Image (spheres, rainbow, N blue to C red):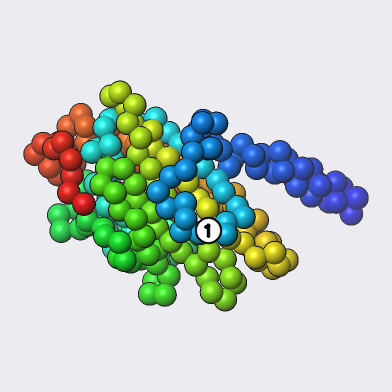
Amino acid sequence: MKKAIAGVSAAVGAYALMRPWMKRWGARPDERNLSYPGDDVVSSANYQAMMAVDVNAPPEAIWPWLMQLGRARGGLYSYDWLDRLFGFLDAPSAKTLLPGVGPLHPGDQVPIGKDPKWYYQVRVVEPNRALVMFLEDPRAGWKWSWSFILVPEGRRTRLLSRSRSYVPRRFGTIAMWAAIELPAFIMTRKMLLNLRERAEGLARAPERAGVNALPHAFPA
């Protein structure tokens, strides 16, 4: 019994040490302190996390992949086997741009799962700059905005993922949020890395992604 308690205590302590790193993975201090499109979607947020990767491609090579997010669309670009296991996806994430899928507009629904009640609502679309989606659970009372921000830096782009949430201060809700925080970090990190891979591939060889050339700007 004592060993079990000690093991649980060690795991909780390790997780507590990891949380600050998870909530800022890849993001620079100056980036974390700036305001971005969609920050006002959850104005009462009491939780915020931000992740980022460098992409050796322009924003125009990232944007079309974001425009086809969702179940029965381009997928979520993370660990497909996990997304399919939990029912978020019904097929592997696309590795090419899909004809007839997208673009997204404010008010659109991005499905995530078999239940039609579960979807991201698109709130902000700024072509080649920002995509902001919103998800809530009225029963639990939590709200979540998820922003993808594209910041050009020379020939590269900073791809930022920013999460802002309101989590009611109730034991059950806090416990649920704690349970999903680590899986969400793992899945989002993989998603950013896969988006980087796809965008860099599109910039190098557009025809492999299903387009004849990489235009200066993709339509919204």
Quarter of the image where one finds residue 142: bottom right
Residue at x 38%, y 37% (from the top left corner): 159
Q: Quadrant of the N terminus?
A: bottom right
**Does the image show residue 109?**
yes
Residue at x 50%, y 50% (from the top left corner): 163
Element on which disc 1 rests: loop
Q: Disc 1 marks which amino acid?
A: Ser
Left/right placement of residue 144 relative to residue 19 reads left
Quarter of the image where one finds residue 157: top left
**Does the image show residue 180?**
no
- Residue 184, percent from left and from top: 53, 51
Residue at x 38%, y 54% (from the top left corner): 132
- Residue 156, percent from left and from top: 32, 27
Nearer to me, 115 or 135: 135
The residue that label 1 is drawn on is 43
Left/right placement of residue 8 relative to residue 201 reads right
Task: Say few, some or many: other residues with alpha carbon within 10 Å of mark 1 (under 14 / 14 to 19 / 20 or more).
Answer: few
Residue at the outermost top position: 154
Nearer to me, 84 or 131: 131
Residue at x 60%, y 72% (from the top left corner): 140
How many marks the image carries: the answer is 1
